Image (cartoon, grey):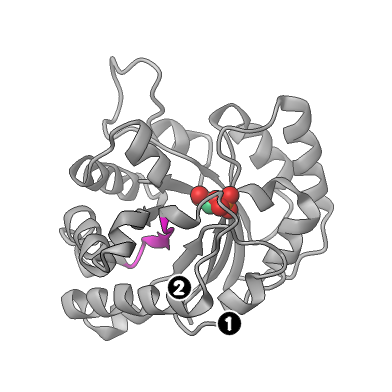
């Protein structure tokens, strides 16, 4: 069975005091996780070590970085390498969030390099894809997302691809309170899985977790996660509230 994953993305939020408080609430929360039903918390880089220390005793809860650079090390002021992430024990890294693509001009080809280096250092990439509103309105979302997958992931071997988690986040649903309907989410997730199957075969495609992101809340998580191709969520705003995020974790299939 593929993993069901409730992932938090704190984005650029929280002071140290707020991060400590949120982490200690998560560490104490009654969550229903197992080896195949996990939670991943993507915190800002300054809190990675703290998050790992606070959550180390929480089985099946992992810490993620929100970004990494595509090079191993060197003169890249301000960047974080996967070698650093590996050295502090980070298990996951978000790659290609739409905010990185939009504000930091990350391209599909740069993201392919980031996926490669994360895999090289045994850090699981959570590869984000998703279309903007104008693309959805023109009904070309499948072609758009298909190209993101093709240009950033389809150079991988089947064995490598099976180590990647995909997060579909329609940009028009991020931080807007406008969630994709469970039918819209299912439709795109099924399309993504069919594209993976066409390239790698259905048993590989069936093994890959595909998360939905965009205004996931405690109140809509169960319906979204109940869709057959939705394997959990990547949650922004609602992950900053421990009770809300706990409800989302407990809504996993
Ligand atoms: P919201 O849950 O705030 O819409 O953000 C989604 C997201 O971008 C998670 O990465």
Identify the residue at image location x=75%, y=65%.
247
CA neighbours of label 1 inside 10 A, class few (<14), some (14 to 19), many (20+): some
Q: Which marked residue is nearer to the observer: mark 1 or mark 2?
A: 2
Q: Quadrant of residue 195?
A: bottom left
**Residue beneath label 2, please?**
185
Residue 169 inside the magenta-drawn segment = yes
**Residue beneath label 1, please?**
226
Mark 1–mark 2 distance (CA, rounded to whole Å): 11 Å
Asked if residue 217 lies left or right of residue 246, the reply is left
Asked if residue 2 lies left or right of residue 251, the reply is left
Ligand 1 within 8 Å of the CB at mark 1: no
* 27 is higher (above) or lower (below) than 200: above
Residue 219 point in image, percent of width and height: 72, 68
Residue 205 point in image, percent of width and height: 31, 78
Give the residues in magenta.
162-170
CA neighbours of label 2 inside 10 A, class few (<14), some (14 to 19), many (20+): many
Identify the residue at image location x=42%, y=40%.
99
Which of these two is toward me, 29 or 217?
A: 217
Secondary structure beneath label 2: helix
Residue 108 point in image, percent of width and height: 22, 47
Q: Quadrant of residue 201?
A: bottom left
């Amino acid at each position: 069975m593929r993993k069901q994953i409730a992932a938090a993305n704190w984005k650029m939020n929280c002071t140290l005091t707020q991060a400590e408080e949120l982490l200690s609430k998560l560490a104490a929360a009654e969550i229903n996780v197992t080896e195949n039903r996990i939670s991943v918390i993507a915190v800002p880089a300054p809190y990675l070590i703290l998050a790992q220390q606070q959550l180390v005793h929480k089985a099946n809860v992992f810490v993620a970085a929100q970004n990494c650079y595509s090079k191993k090390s060197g003169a890249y002021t301000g960047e974080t390498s996967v070698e650093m992430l590996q050295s502090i024990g980070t298990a996951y890294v978000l790659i290609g969030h739409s905010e990185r693509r939009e504000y930091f001009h990350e391209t599909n080809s740069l993201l392919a390099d980031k996926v490669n280096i994360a895999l090289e250092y045994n850090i699981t990439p959570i590869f984000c894809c998703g279309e903007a509103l104008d693309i959805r309105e023109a009904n070309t979302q499948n072609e758009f997302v298909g190209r993101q997958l093709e240009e950033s992931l389809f150079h991988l071997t089947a064995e490598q691809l099976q180590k990647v988690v995909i997060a579909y986040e329609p940009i028009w649903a991020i931080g807007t309170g406008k969630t994709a309907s469970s039918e819209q989410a299912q439709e795109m997730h099924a399309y993504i899985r069919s594209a993976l199957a066409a390239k790698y075969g259905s048993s590989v495609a069936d093994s890959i977790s595909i998360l939905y992101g965009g205004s996931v809340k405690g109140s809509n998580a169960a319906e979204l996660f109940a869709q057959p191709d939705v394997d959990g969520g990547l949650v922004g705003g609602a992950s900053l509230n421990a009770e809300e995020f706990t409800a989302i974790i407990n809504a996993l299939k």
